[in-house]
Image (cartoon, rainbow, N blue to C red):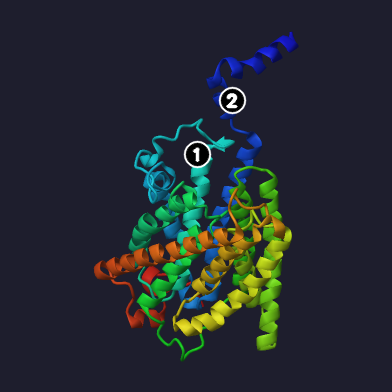
Amino acid sequence: MKRFLSGIAMSLPVMFPGFAMAAESVADKADNGFMMISTALVLFMSIPGIALFYGGLLRSKNVLSLMTQVIATFSLVSVLWVIYGYTLAFGEGNDFFGNFNGLLLKDVHLTDVTGTFYKLIHVAFQGSFACITVGLIVGGFAERVRFSAVILFVFIWFTLAYLPMAHMVWGGGYLFKMGAIDFAGGTVVHINAAIAALVGAYMLGKRSGFGREAFKPHNLPMVFIGTAILYIGWFGFNAGSASSANEIAALAFVNTVTATAGAVLGWLAAEWMIRGKPSLLGACSGCIAGLVAITPAAGSVGIGGALILGIIAGVAGLWGVVVLKSWLKVDDTCDVFGVHGVCGIVGCIGTGILTSAALGGTGYAEGVTMLKQVGVQGISIVVCLLWSGIVAFVAYKIADIFLGLRVPEEVEREGLDVNSHGESAYNQ
């Protein structure tokens, strides 16, 4: 009887093709669990990870304002994501946007499956990427921005910059069709956020006293804790982007460990040679630099490639926050562009090179050479910088016209915590 039933079950897909499609759409419990944990880890990166990391870098009178911006923008993007964000990013559409068919997720049903896990989990996972991207931006203009302006800026930028970039790279749009490799967000998350932060830093101007006063991090242990949270959460970021508990997730996991370790050592070694002392802040910054660089490459480069990429990112990140920042003459408060922008670019170009099977990677698509892949990676970087940068400029301008971007100088001097939020982090 068992053999008979087994034979019937095996013949059903042949007799009824629709049955085969239904069978393939059954969610895998292990992959569901894996993706839910990965999503939770990415959310953990956003709050408290970014809030603690950035908060510790600021002066004590502004730490609460930064944390408020992080949790408020996180919540705003979460709401916008389910209202229209997901359908515009992942719905079928043109090269730049999806469609409005899934407003409020009306076309996502309880049992719908994406790959081997429920589509609702895909909504949450991709939404967590949108949240952390916006959270990264606020570090660029911290300590002098008006809270209401942040909210208006995020609404505009998320709609017109993040969603198109997500669709172009991951939703079947322009860069996806071109063959750009961005495993977990080198362009969509890091370069996207970095250029928006840089534009914001320019448009708000330098903090009062910048260049004349010493603006030191008020709490390095807080920075370290934030770094540790970001590091652990990044495994959900990278391994989760495999969309299954499979061999690519395993590769991404090990690559993340390897590249990050290489970047920490690379940054510390370079800092030691230049400044004579390795610092905790340097180690934390190197950790983030390695995580950023391996993000687009985690699922396609070999272990050796990840180590090389990490070491380069550590040195490049230090160059970004010391040399490039000086060249740009900008007050990027938390060095968003110096780390996320520079190392995101390093990671994207490195992906094009180190994905080569000859260098230990998984190899290119059929007919693609290293030169062609590097060219595509370069185009994706330029598109991201231009698109996000222009949208950011417009969004800041609108916020400035209607609300005013910057707080008055006396408010800045006294601190945003008390003046903008009526609170103090450290009551004496």
Mark 2 belongs to which amino acid? Ala
Residue 58 percent location from the top left of the image: 51, 76
Residue under the image location 55 percent in, 55 percent down: 181
Q: Residues within 10 Å of mark 2 (few under 14, many from 20)?
A: few
- Left or right, 285 with reference to 80: right
x 59%, y 59%: residue: 295
Residue 127 seen in the current view:
no
- Residue at the bottom extreme of this rendering: 212
Where does residue 123 sit, x and y in percent of width and height?
48, 43
Which label was assigned to residue 247?
none
**Where is the N terminus found, in terms of image quarters?**
top right
Residue that extends furthest to the left in the rendered view of this protein: 402
**Which of the 4 quarters of the picture holds residue 93?**
top left
Q: Earlier in the sequence, mark 1 or mark 2?
A: 2
Q: How many marks?
A: 2
Which label was assigned to residue 23?
A: 2
> Is residue 251 found left or right of 132 in the rendered image?
right
Q: Is residue 329 above or below residue 417?
A: below
Q: Which residue is mark 1?
A: 120
Q: Tag 1: residue type? A: Leu
